[in-house]
Amino acid sequence: MELVQMLTNQLGISEEQAQGGSGLLLKMAKEKLGAEEFSQVASAVPGVEDLISSVPEDKGVLGALGGLTSSLGGSAGKLGGLTSLAGGFKNLNLDSDMVGKFIPVVMSFAQSKGGDTVKNILEKILK
């Protein structure tokens, strides 16, 4: 999978970590975007559903906190999304600062496959 290869090469992580981390970002996109917008992302990024299915299960307080704050919406909702990402990344044995390293790679890949339209859709929830 091209995105996973980019992540492993650029970030020096395992294939499992690359799949899980990108899956976490795409899962958040699926949850936050409308069906029409997410379908544009899914059609541009090969293997989206496979990546989402590789996401590790939430463990502990961070996952629950992320779910609670994301249900509040607004800036608290964005914080909740980032909090749940940090928890998911921890489950992959990745530091929470890796979230910030994954985002530009995923955004660049999405733009290369789906152009500015797909990049702009993802920017709404990842930036």
Image: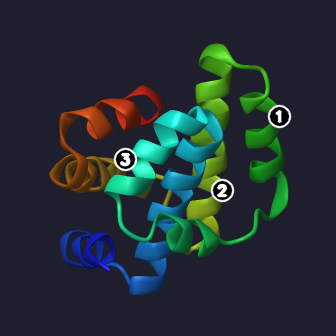
Of residues 85 and 53, the one drawn nearer to the viewer in this rendering: 53
Which is more N-terminal, label 1 or label 3?
1
Asked if the residue under mark 1 is in contact with the one under mark 3, i.e. CB atoms within 8 Å, the reply is no
Residue at the spot of label 1: 68
Point out residue 102 in the picture as x, y percentages from the top left corner: 35, 56
Q: Distance of mark 3 from mark 1, alpha carbons?
A: 22 Å
Residue at the spot of label 2: 87
Q: Distance of mark 1 from mark 2, alpha carbons?
A: 13 Å
- Judge whether residue 127 can be spotted in this image: no
Q: Residue at x 48, y 83 (%)?
A: 16
Q: Residue at x 64, y 14 (%)?
A: 74
Q: Residues within 10 Å of mark 2 (few under 14, many from 20)?
A: many
- Label 1 or label 2, whichever lies nearer to me, is 1
- Name which residue type carries label 1: Leu
- Judge whether residue 83 can be spotted in this image: yes
Q: Residue at x 78, y 40 (%)?
A: 67
Point out residue 127 in the picture as x, y percentages from the top left corner: 38, 31
The answer to whether residue 110 is left or right of residue 34 is left
- Name which residue type carries label 3: Gly
Picture quadrant where residue 57 is located: bottom right
Residue at the spot of label 3: 100
